[in-house]
Image: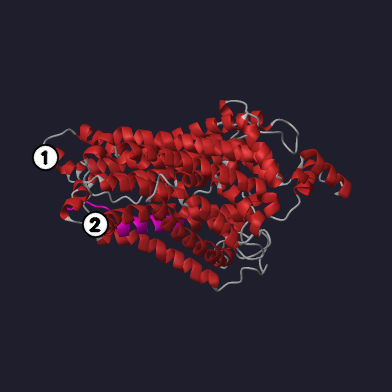
Amino acid sequence: MIASPLRFGAVITPLVSRAVSAFAVIALIGLLPWLSGSDPALSILRAKSAEQEATPEALQAIRSQLGLDQGPIALLLRWWRGILQGDAGHSWISGKPVLPAMLDAAGVSLTLMGAALILAILVATLLCVSTLRNGLRGAADSSHGAWAMAFTTLPEYLLASLLLMVGAIWLPLFPPYGWHGVQHLVLPALALGLPAGGLLARLLADALRSTFAEPWLITWRVAGVSPFDCAIAVLRRALPALLPQIGLITVGLTGGAVAVEKIFAIPGLGRATLGASAAQDLPALQCGVLLLLLIATVSGTLGNLLRQLILGRALRSGSLSAPTISPTMRSHYAFPTTIAVALVLLIAVGLTRDPLASDFLRLQPPSLALPLGADATGRDLLARVAHGAFATLITAAGVSVACLLVGIVFGLFPRLFIGPMEIANALPPMMAGLIVVALTGPSTYGAALAVMLVSWAPLAAHTAALVEEILTRPYVRITPLLGVGPWHRFTGYVLPALIGPVTRHALVRFPGVTLALTALGFLGLGQQPPYPEWGRIVAEGMPYIERAPWAVLAPVITLMLLAMLAVSLGQMTFGVKKKK
């Protein structure tokens, strides 16, 4: 009698969460022009014809034609009624039906997502071969995953530009832009798949190390189980915790491909939705966001179903074991210490130099007096990178801590917050940045808020998956019989087993947070000039990347060093290693 209402609540709560969250986001988007205080008629006029004079008569004609005089609530209700009838309305810019165009764009993005996901899984598999091999041999994995770190820290917009320059200009192997065949898929898939593969490799390596530290594997080896069977069992044990992350990465490859779609002129959903946001074409923007949310829901549901399929019996029987944690060996301090010293020296030397004075030749190459070269206006890149570290790194650290706290809290109630979780992951940081900037104006704090709003979801999904597994471990299941209350069980058993992997995950994603901030700075939505900021430094150097690559490589190499430090610290501080 009790189980049936509980099962009903377990089903209905996620549905209500998704529906309420989707309605709230669509309503916020519909109210955005009025909340920002701007005149949507003026934005539409500028999008249709930048040269036409914005006379009161022209603006009133647009308001009458689109029904803007009725107010945002009436427009929103009319749009929802149309959606229930399969009609997403007509574009305020082109006048064409929105739904067919957005469905075509979604098909393009899903195709690109599929190719990038296959590549990401292949890259992650290749990068984790050494971890799997060392674990099967019973040896500690001493690798730092330098390749995975490098792939993770490559900005997609920079990688796309490099691939375009090398693969389509220097070596004309692939077309530079468009979407007319398989040959147009290769470069964009590489630009999206390599960073996603690096991130997935770091998460998979972490899950493999944790699994190899579980005591059941020792029993299997003593019993003479073959290495192949052990490898299959280890993968089956490690993959379920990753499946929610794979679902979130999949959605990110769809909505987060805005920069790549823009560089390669791909008519995808992210690019179309971002364009609608910039033009305040509300019907197109609302339809694009709704499709992104549907893709996020389907991906998340499939990931959870696969996870339940793999771990279902173990979850129900409470037979999941816990890893054995041991202190970090001293040899593992050498790598992060070296990186930290290099970063401190770079920033310390750069802070003594002027980042705003144009004292050098335009695009002057690196030398002893100018270690990183000069930018297009003759400013010292070492000084700009060092001073930009405070604007970027401190902001990224604050955003990462906030995402960690929000992710843990929301992840403890996954059914209640599944809707916000999927929406946060479906919205690209660029789109969130445009929404926040429309309300607050471009600033460092606005960019930080935008990134935080969309970056906590993977940590929440990881928390939810880990909590479910931890609660089924035998030593946790038996605590109520020993008189341990729920709060003591959470603080004494669940939280200690949870905090290490999630914090390590947050450190792995720290470079991604930094990249998101630099991407917003790249678009001019973050710190405003003349103050140095890493994304703005990259944006200023991109037009000269072919003749003066140091203008772009300076902040990118610094970012890669930062990523290696963050991931190494996570592995060193919260690492899971086997006792000898």
Residue 219 visible = yes
Farthest-out residue, left: 223
Quarter of the picture holding the N terminus:
top left
Q: Mark 1 is on which residue type?
A: Val
Position of 304 relative to 515 (above/below)? above
Q: Which color scheme is applied? A: secondary structure
**Dot 1 or dot 2, earlier in sequence:** 1
Farthest-out residue, top: 181
Residue 65, horizontal then vertical, whole percent = 80, 38
Q: Considering the numbered disc 2 on the image, is that residue within a helix, a strand or a loop?
A: loop
Specify start and end residues of the magenta stretch as a single range: 560-580
Position of 397 relative to 221 (above/below)? below
Locate residue 100: give its quadrant. top right
Residue 462, horizontal then vertical, whole percent = 38, 47
169 vs 330, left or right, is right
- Choose between 491 and 579: the one closer to the eye: 491
Q: Name the residue under label 1.
A: 222
Number of the label disc, if any, that sits on residue 485: 2
Q: Considering the numbered disc 1 on the image, is that residue within a helix, a strand or a loop?
A: helix
Farthest-out residue, front: 1
- Most frequent secondary structure within the magenta stretch: helix
Is 406 contained in the magenta span?
no
Instruction: Say which residue appears at 53% left-offset and 30% top-offset.
Output: 111
Q: How far apart are marks 1 and 2 (CA)?
A: 38 Å
Count every numbered label the image shows and give the total. Answer: 2
Residue 337, horizontal then vertical, whole percent = 36, 63
Locate residue 228: give its quadrant. top left
Q: Nearer the viewer, mark 1 or mark 2?
A: 2
322 vs 268, left or right, is left
Label 2: few (<14), some (14–19) or many (≥20) C-alpha neighbours in 10 Å: few
Residue 538 visible = no
